[in-house]
Structure formats: C-alpha cells, structure tokens
Image: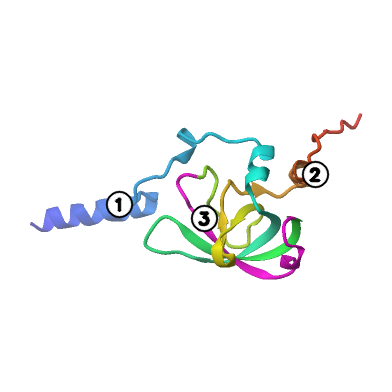
Amino acid sequence: MTTFRSLRYLVLVAAMLLGVPWDVQPRNRRSYCREVALEEREEVANVIFTGTVLKLYRSQTDIYRGSIRVKRVIKGDSNLAENTIIVDGFGDPRICFSDVRERDTRIFLVSQLHGGHLRLNSSVIRLSLRSLNKAISAVRGKTFKTTVIS
C-alpha cells in the first residue's frame, strides 16, 4: 500500500516538474484555423487600435476579458486614445490567435456591441512597424508596399 502511494506521489511530482496538465485539454487552434487577410478583417472591425494589456480577468470558460490601455486609434472613435477599456473575447477558440498575456502590446481588431461593449473579433497582431503600417494601409484602402533597402 505504501509503495503504491509513494509511486503515485513520484509520478505526480514528475508530471508537475515536466508541466503535464492533468485536467486541461490542450487547445491547438492552429490546426483548424483559417487566417483571413487583414483587409477583410479590417472591414468587419468597428474599432482598430494599438494598446497594452494591463490586467486579465479569467472566468470558468476559456473565453476571458482584459483591461487594455489604448495607445493609438487606427480606426474608430479617437476619444479612446490614452484611455483604459475592457475588451471581451480573448481565448475564443473560434479566433486563431486570441490569447494574450499581461504587458503584451498588440494591435486589436474589435467590434462595438450594444451598450458600447467591445469584443475581439479577429486575431490579435504583434506590434511592429511593418504590421502597424500594414494595418493603417488596410484602413485607408491602400495596398501595402514593402520597401527594400539595398
């Protein structure tokens, strides 16, 4: 009896050290995601902005909300700039890249719902100069041109 308990304890400790989840099924969304072009995603979004995730509010489901400090508004109400807002829909399994961590700075494409609530409707985009210029070009309806430095 004691051998069985110590073996079970040893397996539990080994699993914890290796990071094996016991009760959580892995969410491999990339296997069935179809990434849509940024121009198409921009047309669906009411508001597009850059911002930093300040705090995440997780619930019992996979979908959670986050408090975002808006830096720059690319499309939508420019009064959101330099404000802190709540965005719902992070972790949504129907959106390919919808998981964020605190202190992440990203480009967010959201829809404004009834009552002014904002909900993520597309994958979050890593913030870089190239991705920012591409998002701005999509909002303005222009084709994004890359420049080659020689």
C-alpha gap between disc 3 and disc 2: 27 Å
Query: Going 7% across and 57% down the picture, which residue do you hit?
Result: 1
Task: State the mark number for residue 90.
Answer: 3
Q: Quadrant of residue 69?
A: bottom right
Amino acid type at circle 3 is Phe
Count of number-bearing discs:
3
51 horizontally vs 36: left or right: right
Looking at the picture, how far across and down is residue 93, in whole percent? 45, 46
Query: Residue 79 colored magenta?
Result: yes
Looking at the picture, how far across and down is residue 147, in whole percent? 87, 33
Mark 2 surroundings: few (<14), some (14-19) or many (≥20) residues within 10 A: few
Amino acid type at circle 2 is Arg
Specify which label sits upstream in the sequence, 3 or 2: 3
Amino acid type at circle 1 is Trp
Q: Residue furthest front?
A: 114
Specify which label sits upstream in the sequence, 2 or 1: 1
Residue segment shown in magenta: 75-94
Task: State the mark number for residue 22.
Answer: 1
Mark 3 surroundings: few (<14), some (14-19) or many (≥20) residues within 10 A: many
Q: Secondary structure at mark 2?
A: helix
